[in-house]
Image: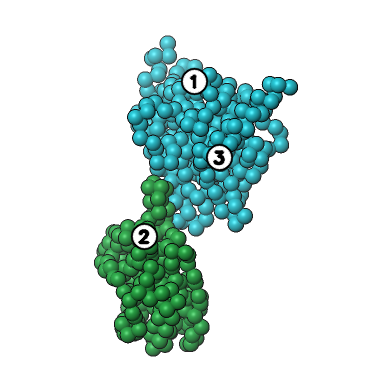
Chain colours: A green, B cyan
Amino acid sequence: MSILEYNGAAMIAMAGKNCVGIASDRRLGMQAQTVSCNFQKVFPMGDKLHVGLAGLASDVQTVHQLLEYRLNLYELNEEREMSPQVFSTLLSNVLYSKRFSPYFIEPIVAGLDKDNKPFLSGSDLIGATVIADDFVVAGTCTGNLHGMCETLYKPDMGPDQLFETLAQSLLAATDRDALSGWGGIVHIITAEGIVTRELKGRMD
Amino acid sequence: MARRYDSSTTTFSPEGRLHQVEYAIEAINNAGTCVGILAKDGIVMASERRITSGLLAPAKTSEKTYKLCSHAACNVAGLTADANILIDQARIYAGKNHYVYQDPVPVEELVEHVCNYKQAYTQYGGLRPFGVAFLFAGYDKHHGFQLYQSDPSGNYSGWKATVIGANNQAGKSLLKTEYKEKAPSVQEALMLAVRVLNKTMDGTAASVEKMELFKMTVDDKGKCQHHILTATEAKDVIDSVVAESASAGDS
């Protein structure tokens, strides 16, 4: 058993035309047993920035709280909002600082920079970051997620079409994974604001 | 006589005084005035802006008012370099506390932490004390809006209204007569703060460039709002104070 598969997760972040979306499942399990169907794995870090954390639930919560602490300190000292690129680098730095006793998480970052251009990045548990212009995935069914996204993704989708693509990719991928699913949540971030929708899917 | 006992912070004089600490307090009495007033729906802090040179680049947002966390801010009187160290300390402490407890740090705890740090420089290490006095303004669910004053000795106390910096005695005496038993509204407190600054800055006419007005309130969602008044808003307050005193003079 891998520690990264103990609790189960599935998440996707995808870029559209002047918008980004980030979606995750809601399951919290302890191996085979499902404990919660509304566990939060995607966290708002600013008006136009979200971070999704897949992996060991304890580290998901701890890393989120740590990132919030670091972000708040940055904004107090710099007197400005942290851009998604800088946030992604901060996250990488935090993870690498624990290179030899890592946080067991796979994070993805989705946001709009100050010109409302989409920003996506994903990294591994020790902070190796990859910046993408289409989509990033994380969780216990990344094979399924990659397959679904590669098939359904088109560049320059509008917010509504982006939502449909994210929702269908997530639901189809998690349906073939025992450890993820039990509901879904999708956030679409545009210059105007954030729209959040909950997905009704198979609860198994 | 004092000279034998005043070069080391860690030595008491025969009269039981710490001269280095007292000299640090003297340094602050030459700094720009800050006044803090507790209102019933918020806190007001006003400070004197000392413009030493026209060539100076304008500060980011302020060189007197600093945000410490989402629910606390402070005003500085004294050596800005010393203040920066303490403000960093306060920000880190508030952030770490929130990280550990997932709850906003109680304001008094934050103040006490900064003051304990200051106190250490009056007892250990042979280092000089910090030449800074603070006015802390904060809001928490335990005690609502709170105003604290601290000095280089590491001592602090809670106030309904107080003044630090140059001419603080004149400011305090004005507050003693004008601060009513019933706490003022934020708007009334702003006007009272301007009147206090007028008195401490006696001679110079009140103007937007020379004063900085800050208010802390809570919105209807319970979230703390920090606001340094814009030039227009500050001008409105100053104008209404001037108008009030002009009409008072007539009657």
- Asked if badges 3 and 2 are on one and the same chain, I answer no
Q: Is residue B97 above or below residue A96?
A: above
User: Residue at 61% of width from left, 28% of height from top?
Assistant: B242
Identify residue type, mark 2.
Answer: Asp
Chain label for disc 3 = B
Q: Is residue B66 left or right of residue A94?
A: right
User: Residue at 66% of width from left, 29% of height from top?
Assistant: B244
Please state the horizontal and vertical placement of residue A188, each as a whole percent of the image: 44, 71
Chain label for disc 1 = B
User: Residue at 62% of width from left, 36% of height from top?
Assistant: B189
* Dot label at residue B16: 1
Identify residue type, mark 3.
Answer: Glu
For label 2, the SS is: loop
Q: Is residue B111 above or below residue A157?
A: above
Task: Give the residue at mark 2.
Answer: A115
Asked whether the residues under the numbered discs 2 and 1 touch, taking CB atoms below 8 Å apart as contact, a structural biologist would say no
Q: Callout 3: 10 Å neighbours few (<14), some, many (20+)?
A: few
Task: Give the residue at mark 3.
Answer: B233
Q: Callout 1: 10 Å neighbours few (<14), some, many (20+)?
A: few
Please state the horizontal and vertical placement of residue B231, each as a whole percent of the image: 50, 38
Judge by depth and name the residue closer to the eye, A57 or A75: A75
Asked whether the residues under the numbered discs 1 and 3 touch, taking CB atoms below 8 Å apart as contact, a structural biologist would say no
| Earlier-in-chain disc, 1 versus 3 | 1
Please state the horizontal and vertical placement of residue B24, each as a whole percent of the image: 43, 25
Judge by depth and name the residue closer to the eye, A82 or B13: A82
Task: List the single residue furthest toward the right.
Answer: B251
Mark 2, mark 1: which one is toward the viewer?
Answer: 2
For label 1, the SS is: loop
Chain label for disc 2 = A
